[in-house]
Amino acid sequence: MDSEHFLALADGTVFFGRSCGAPRDAEGEAVFNTGHTGYQEIVSDPSYAGQTVVLSAPEIGNYGCRAADMQSRGLFLSGLVTRRMNPPSNARSEEALTDLLRRFEIPALTGVDTRGLVLHLRRAGSQRSYLHCSDWPISPGEGVRRARAFAGLDGLDMTARVTDPDGSSWEAPEDEPSGAPLLAALDFGMKRSILRELRRAGFRVRVVTAQTGADEVLALKPDGVFLSNGPGDPAGVPHAVETVRELLGRVPTVGICLGHQILALACGAKTGRLKFGHHGCNHPVKDLTDDSVAITSQNHNFAVLKDSLPAEAELTHVNLNDGTVEGIRLPRARALSVQFHPEAAPGPDDAKSLFGRFRAMF
């Protein structure tokens, strides 16, 4: 290909394309997402912080972007890779995806053989990568060298990059019911759709930063605690694990995604890295409490290790693709968590009943 832009992987593989986002380069961990829709929700999900996301769906950008569909106050992913980036042709569109990416200075590549790239990442696993989209020329070999020099994301506290430092993104609505249970939500990279579903389930919600300690949380006098989704390695946030450990048994606690992993670590379990993670909206999960199956939305590179669960932790959900842990319950501590995103709607409403379970605990 005659293009000067490319994605270089640490294993020496290079995929060429054309820049269609911000004209700059970026290091990141290359992962793929198997969803066929929802590209705006993907790029605005803080759980992708530090990652270069490869979209397996070939046609991207067709329905544009809207402010109401943003999942956070900005974009935190490292970069985006697509097969074909199209202009919007939808009356609801307020902004083209390319313009959204440029506004938040996110580089993107189009014209890439994403089918080949996804298959490569499935075989080789998630890769340290270097996305070259700037006007300054570098060789593919130099891109590979820079990808190999990237330290990766393991052990890093990625929540510090995405948590809202002053809480201005999470102001309570004026019509919030005064008598509803108060939920303190730790923002490890929370999505707006999660907050919306918690309020629909009958909670008042006060959002605090990822660095908030147990004493500060309890000072709010919450009826319960919610542990949000977020990016990165759960082992990189020992402060959050200690906070949750101090809260367990004192107030009902629920968690999703990274919050699920933090809860598991707090009760003595261990986590480990998956080969290429779970990223998409078509992951089947079995609920062991009633033998039902839900099609779920997921975004994580780490999972709770089943054999490490302590005796007091009940396994409630498993992934039907690979058998990994998707949910646990701690009856004595009045705590439960799931690995997937129950607020998302790929099923479309398969997993939303979990918010009712959360509400029944209070």
Image: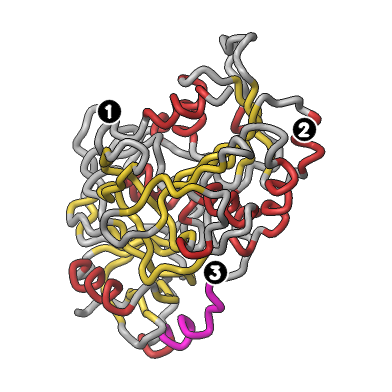
**Does the magenta stretch mainly form a helix, a strand or a loop?**
helix
Q: Amino acid at mark 2?
A: Leu
Q: Are marks 2 and 3 in contact (CB under 8 Å)?
A: no
Expressed as whole percent of the image width and height from the top left, the position of residue 294 reads 28, 40
Quarter location, residue 131:
bottom left
Query: Could you tell me which secondary element the residue under label 3 belongs to?
Result: loop
Question: Gap between marks 1 and 3, in whole Å?
Answer: 37 Å
Label 2, label 1: how many angstroms apart (C-alpha)?
Answer: 43 Å
Please give the name of the residue rendered at 46% of the width and 69% of the height, measured from the top-left corner: 273
Residue 189 visible here: yes
Q: Residue 200: x percent and y percent?
A: 46, 19
Identify the amino acid type marked 3: Leu
Q: Kindly identify the amino acid type of the residue bearing the numbered disc 1.
A: Arg
Q: Magenta residues?
A: 143-152
Q: Residue at x 50, y 29 (%)?
A: 358
Q: Residues within 10 Å of mark 1 (few under 14, many from 20)?
A: few
Q: Indicate the quadrant containing the N terminus: top left, top right, bottom left or bottom right.
A: bottom left
Circle 3 residue = 153
What is the count of numbered marks?
Answer: 3
